[in-house]
Image: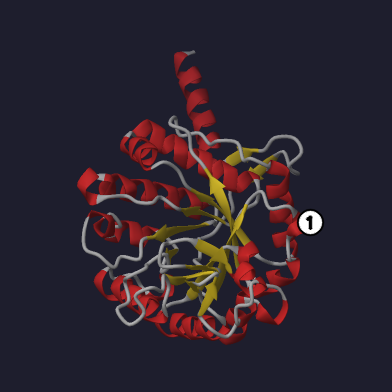
Amino acid sequence: MKKLIILCIASLSILSSCQKEVIWVPDGYGASTVEKPSGEYMADKSFKRISYIYHNTNLANLDSAKLKYVTHLHFAFLNPKEDGTLQTLTNHANFEALNKLAKDNNVKTAISIQGNELMFRTIAANEQTRKKLVKSLVDFAVRYNLDGIDLDWEYPRANYGSDVTFEVFVQELSSELHSWHKYLSMAVTAGLYAGPVKDGITAGAIEAVDFVNLMAYDGIGTDTAEPNHHSSYGMANRVIDIWLNDKLVPKEKIILGVPLYGKNADNTSMTYTALLAAGANPNLDVFSVSGVNYYYNGLATIKQKTELAKSKGNGVMFWEYSQDAKGENSLLKASFDASR
């Protein structure tokens, strides 16, 4: 009898191990279960035009015509809790509507996770909460049929040891996402200055992700030729060279970040649409508002940066979709035209 019981348990274990992994999906999300796909994960190495968009954007306020100019939408933001679970989105219905609209227009989608730096460090340093966060993110991506997850941890720092825990977290999350045929990307510092922030992104983390979004903006004073510009062409070129040559990011993973807003020397922002409404020339990069110069990227510069991204990288990333103009003055359109 004892042998029979042992054989039965062994048989059940074998049958369980042969079944595909399943994620249970709550009512209202289509199928009751989603099975893990079979076959090897293949990374998408095509040129990308990514735009972040606020996840709670109302469709009534969205210029959906510009969706044809992007390949990916990254919804900002999803926040973790200290226990590795996820906070509730502020307007879940809008997120779902945006996701469906993007999918209907053949645009890939991801949710971008952000949070307090101390919370990220604490979660990643603890194996239990780190694995809980990995599971929470993968379940979220599967449940809402997202194509991937984007990490906006600003920033892991080598002097806190979070370079090590960040790498472990990225590797674990990447492995799980890839097993579901979903991608992992990360947004990173411009890397213009040596130090713990630049060192916080390790070679292991770079290897684990599908692509790296370089935040080549908000850099007032970084370009001696244009010291008051927060995102000059010269800065963009320098940022790519740093990540390509110093950090050794493969060319096919480099995505150049560009702004859909301008800034003055005091770091005050104005959206590109607001600047045009105030009278700014879409073909220039500076405009005076009430006697104060605002520096932005006009059509010509966006096209130049897209060409730069084609020659030294593999895509462009925009912050943020709703800040772009409509019609022929659209910077998303200018980048699309330049990338063909």
Badge 1: few (under 14), some or many (20 or more) residues near its Cα, within 10 Å? few
On the rendered structure, is 45 left or right of 157?
Answer: right
Colouring of the image: secondary structure
Residue 70 % position (x, y): 62, 71
On the rendered structure, is 78 left or right of 210?
Answer: right
Give the camera-side residue of 245 and 325: 325
Q: Is residue 151 above or below residue 80?
A: below
Secondary element under disc 1, as helix, strand or loop, is helix
Residue 266 % position (x, y): 41, 62
Q: Looking at the image, can residue 127 be seen? A: yes
Which residue in the rendered view is the most extreme toward the front? Answer: 291
Residue, disc 1: 60
Q: Is residue 118 above or below residue 10?
A: below
Q: Is residue 221 above or below residue 16?
A: below
Residue at coordinates 57% horizontally, 62% vertically from top-left?
Answer: 320
Q: Looking at the image, can residue 44 be seen? A: no
Residue 143 % position (x, y): 64, 44
Residue at coordinates 65% horizontally, 76% vertically from top-left?
Answer: 330
Residue 56 % position (x, y): 66, 48
Which residue in the rendered view is the most extreme toward the right? Answer: 60
Give the camera-side residue of 295 and 9: 295
On the rendered structure, is 139 left or right of 210?
Answer: right
The quadrant in which the C terminus is found is bottom right
Give the camera-side residue of 312 and 137: 312
Give the camera-side residue of 155 and 325: 325
In the image, what residue type sits under mark 1? Ala
Q: How many marks?
A: 1
